[in-house]
Image: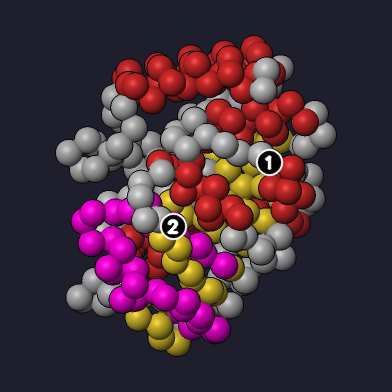
Amino acid sequence: MKLAVVIPAYNERQTIAECLARVAAALPEVPKEIIVIDDCSRDGTRDWLEGNVGDLTAEGCAVTVNADGDLEVADGPIGHVQIRALYHQQNKGKGGALQTGLRAVSGDIVVIQDADLEYDPDDWREMYRLIAEKRVADVVYGSRFYGRPHRALYFHHYLANRLISFLFNAMYDQTLTDIEVCYKMFTREVLDTLRITANDFGFEVQFSAQVARARRWRIYELGISYYGRTYLEGKKINWKDGVKALWYLLKYRFE
């Protein structure tokens, strides 16, 4: 089953090369399409993508980063990998970038990957097994709160995430611990039912609301590692996004 990896990117020039190399190397036995959406970056991310990606296909090769920070394709244990880059002419937000990427997906299973190296693609394996091999799940959430390596940062982020997840569970009769997590893996059938309109970080709430309200999808959650960034290191989400998430909980409950 082909895995589609959707990567929204905004001002991630320092991490995008390493991100793509890690994504290409994950689950080497699984054919992958990797779709990067540059959301009108201003730091050279687009220039780098245009110079390195275009429409790159590697068959039985490894995708690595050379000393100059560019991608190289060499002999290696990786199966079929296709990398495509899409570009926004104006910044639309994470949700807007994801909408663009999800419309371009042709894979059987979809996973969302941030470009900032906070999440490790090696954690996909068990998520993928639950959907493609064990066939017990339609949607799998990663959770940063199940005991895997987790950088200790920002108590107010932790508290807000816990509150948002608690309220979501109370409203939708779920038991998820981390609905704001980046890592969500789901089947093509789930994707075809989504009607995402949120252009910002509200994507996380709207996606979760639509999945939960459907009452037909088998939802699982498992622990993942988390290598969080500080604001000095480039972290973008802030307290305003937390306030918006509370509003979105109500808005999408009745959409």
Give the answer, above or below, for where 18 lies relative to 100. below
Question: Up-down: is 243 above or below 9?
Answer: above
Q: How far across and down, in percent of the image, does residue 220 sit?
A: 68, 36
Q: Is residue 224 left or right of residue 110?
A: left
User: Residue shown at 40%/41% (left/top)?
Assistant: 93
Vertically, is 113 above or below 204?
below
Image check: 74 left or right of 82? left
| Secondary structure at numbered mark 1 | loop
Q: Residue at x 58, y 43 (%)?
A: 184
Could you tell me if the residues under marks 2 and 1 are in contact, i.e. CB atoms within 8 Å? no
Q: Amino acid at mark 1?
A: Leu
Residue 96 lies, in percent from the top left, at 48, 44
The image's mark for residue 234 is none
First to last magenta residue range? 33-62
Query: Where is mark 1, residue-wise?
Result: 194
Q: Earlier in the sequence, mark 2 or mark 1?
A: 2
Residue pointed to by mark 2? 37
What residue is shown at x 54% (from left), y 74% (from top)?
Answer: 81
Element type at mark 2: strand
